[in-house]
Image: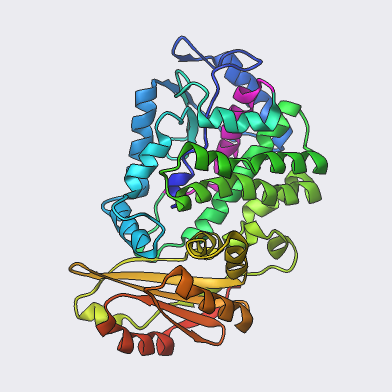
Amino acid sequence: MSRATALLAVAFAAGCVRGRLVHEGQVNASALAAVVHDLPAVRGLDFLRPVPAVALRPDDVAAWVRRDIDLSYPGDDLDRVSMVYERLGLLPAGVTLRAVLEELYRGQIAAFYDPRSKQLVLATEALGVGGLGVRLFSLLTGRDLVGELLVAHELTHALQDQRWGLPTEPEPLADAHGDRLLARRALLEGDATLAGFAYVQRGTPTRDTIDQIEQRLHGIAPTLAAEYPRVPEIIRVSLAFQYDAGTAFTGWALAEGGWSEVDRVEADPPASTEQVLHPARYFGVRDRPIEITLRGTEEMEAAGWHRILEDTLGELTIRVLARRGLTEDRARGVADGWGGDRLRALVRGDELLLVWVTAWDGPPDAIEFFEAMPDVMPAARVERRGERVLVLIGPPAVLDGLSARVWNRTTSARGG
C-alpha cells in the first residue's frame, strides 16, 4: 500500500514569493535555482549532483503517475492485494486498488520528485484549482508561500535520495515487508515536511513550532475523509500517517539533536509503524519488531495451493482493521501491544486461504487481540498460545490440519 500512497501528497501551487516556478509552460529556471541554492544551508545537506526539472501538462503528469503505479505493482500485484484486502475487510467488495488510487490522484498531483529518473516534475498548471495538496499545506503557513514550501519539500526528497537512496524497486509480493516500508516513508515525508517549513521560515523550527506544525497536520485525516469518502479507510489512513505521524516522529529527532540527528535516523530508519506511532519505542528503549518465519503450508502448496502474497500488516493496519468492529479507543488499545506479524495468502481455483500469525508484547496483549477478533473478523478461526495468536480464514475442511502444522513449524524471534 505504501508504495502507491506515497505518490499522492505532493502538490505544487502555481505562485510563490520568488515568482512562478512554471511560466508559460516552462520551468522558471531562476525561481527554481533560488530554492536549489538556499535549501542546502537550511537542511544541512548539499546536493551531490544537479536535479533536472521538467514541466509537463496535467495529462502528461497523470500518465507519469499511472506509469509509476504500474512499475510499483507489476503484473497482477494490485489485483492480488485487492483480493486479500477485500477478504480481510479492508476493501469493500468489488472495489479494486487501481480504481481507488486513480480516483485519489485525479486532479491533485501537481509536482513530485521521481527517484527513478532523478527528476523534479512540475505541472504546467495546478491540477484542480484549490486542490487537496494546496489546501493541506496551506494549513501550515496561512500565507501564500505554498509554492516555496512544496518545492523545498520535493527537493528534500532529492537530497535524501542522493544520500540514502529512495526505494524504487518493488518487493516481491510473496515476500513483502509493507509495514517497514511504510515506516520509512513516514520518516522521509516527515523530514521533507519539516525541511520545507524550515525553508520558508529560514531557520530550524523550534520545539514549539514543531508542535504547532504537528497540530495542523492532524487535519489531514479528516480532510481526506471529507474529500474522498469513497476511498477506503486503509488508503486514506496510510497516506495521512506518512505526513502526520511521520512529522511527529521526525520532529522528535529534530528537537533533540537538530538536522544531524535527523540524518542519523535516516541512516537507521524505523523498522515498523509501531516505532513511528510511538517515538519513544525508537528513540528510547528500541522496541524492535518480532520477526516471524511462517511455516506449515508446504503440504498444501505441494497439493495445488499457490502463494500469492506474504506481508507484515503492522500496528497501523491492525488499528484500521480493528475499527471494523470496535470503537476508536479500543481499536488503538488492541493494536498497541503489537510485536510482529506475518500474513500469507494462498489460492486454489476460486478458493482463498489466509494464514496470519501475530506476536504480541505479552500474554495480556495477545488475550486482548484474541478476545476482540470475534467482533472484528467473525468468520475467522482464531487460536491463541501464549503471546502468539493465529488467525485462519478459508475453507473449513483444510483448517484443522493446517492449524497444527503452522503452530508446530512457525518460529519467531525479536529483531536485532
Number of numbered discs on residues: 0
Where residue 290 appears, as percent x and y from the top left, is 56, 74
The residue furthest top is 24
**160 up-or-down from 301: above or below:** above
Prevalent SS, magenta region? helix
Q: Is residue 313 left or right of residue 398?
A: right
Magenta includes 157?
A: yes
> Residue 104 sits in which quadrant?
top left
Residue 245 appears anywhere in the view: yes
Residue visible at 48% across and 83% down in the picture? 411
Closer to the camera, 129 or 256? 129
Q: Which residues are magenta?
A: 143-168
**103 up-or-down from 120: above or below:** below
Where residue 146 appears, as percent x and y from the top left, is 62, 25
Residue 160 appears anywhere in the view: no
> Residue 135 sits in which quadrant?
top right
Where residue 264 appears, as percent x and y from the top left, is 69, 53
Closer to the camera, 352 or 271? 352
Closer to the camera, 96 or 146? 96
Where residue 386 appears, as percent x and y from the top left, is 56, 87
Q: Is residue 341 left or right of residue 194?
A: left
Magenta includes 72?
A: no
User: Is the C terminus in the top left, top right, bottom left or bottom right quadrant?
Assistant: bottom right
> Residue 396 sits in which quadrant?
bottom left
Residue visible at 65% across and 44% down in the picture? 218
Identify the coloring: rainbow
**377 up-or-down from 25: above or below:** below
**129 up-or-down from 397: above or below:** above
